[in-house]
Image (cartoon, grey):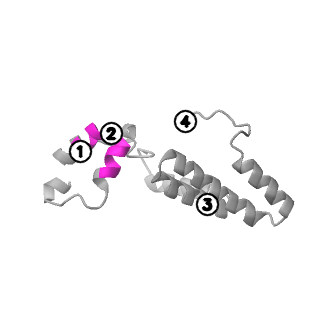
Amino acid sequence: THVKFGLGPCWGLSQKLQRRVGPGRAQLISYTAMPVPAKAALDWGLLDDMVETNAVQRALEIADSIGKNDAVMVQRYKRALQEGGSMTLADGLQRERQLGMAHYLQAVNDGTTVANAKDFITDENRPRLQSKL
């Protein structure tokens, strides 16, 4: 819609959109200013969920699911996702390790346990589950 109203690309949309949907789709959306149908927006990753009725109820279900979890850990994951999302994968993984270590240092005030946690977190050769990402 920026081109429709003569607005310049200055809030990050030109960069974020192409990273989300790819350069071709970003160009289509940006140059035409045409609305993206809901199904396409879901398929392209612009939407996380789509409900046919009662969107408020769905939002409350999601909020309730979040609220049932440990609030401190939700905040820590939010920080890891927000900070790491703007980094390269390698830098994001390093930041995640730093945040994880900060959690262990705060949660466990036992020098031996902290040392063991630090060794485990920083050991690049530790056993790992195979990621599907």
Q: Nearer the viewer, residue 111 or 35?
A: 111
Q: Which x, y percent locates residue 21?
A: 34, 41
- Hey, what amino acid is under mark 1? Ile
Q: Which quarter of the rendering shows the C terminus?
A: top right
- Which part of the image, by quadrant, shows the N terminus? bottom left
Q: Which residue is mark 2?
A: 22
Q: Are marks 2 and 3 in contact (CB under 8 Å)?
A: no
Q: Amino acid at mark 3?
A: Arg
Query: What type of secondary structure mainly makes up the magenta span?
Result: helix
Give the residues drawn in magenta, as a range: 15-27
Per the image, the residue denoted by label 3 is: 76
Give the secondary structure at mark 4.
loop
Three-letter amino acid code at the position of disc 2: Gly
In x, y percent, where is residue 72?
66, 64
Element at label 3 = helix
Q: Is residue 11 left or right of residue 31?
A: right
Q: Is residue 129 left or right of residue 94?
A: right
| Distance Cα–Cα, label 2 vs label 3 | 29 Å
In this rendering, the answer to whether 47 lies above or below 67 is: above
Residue at 38% across, 37% down: 43
Tell me which label, 4 or 2, sits earlier in the chain: 2
- Tag 4 residue: 133
First along the sequence among labels 1 and 3: 1
Locate residue 70: give its quadrant.
Answer: bottom right
Question: Dot 3 surroundings within 10 Å: few (below 14), some, or many (20 or more)?
Answer: some
Q: Nearer the viewer, residue 58 or 79?
A: 79
Q: Magenta includes 24?
A: yes
Residue that label 1 marks: 29
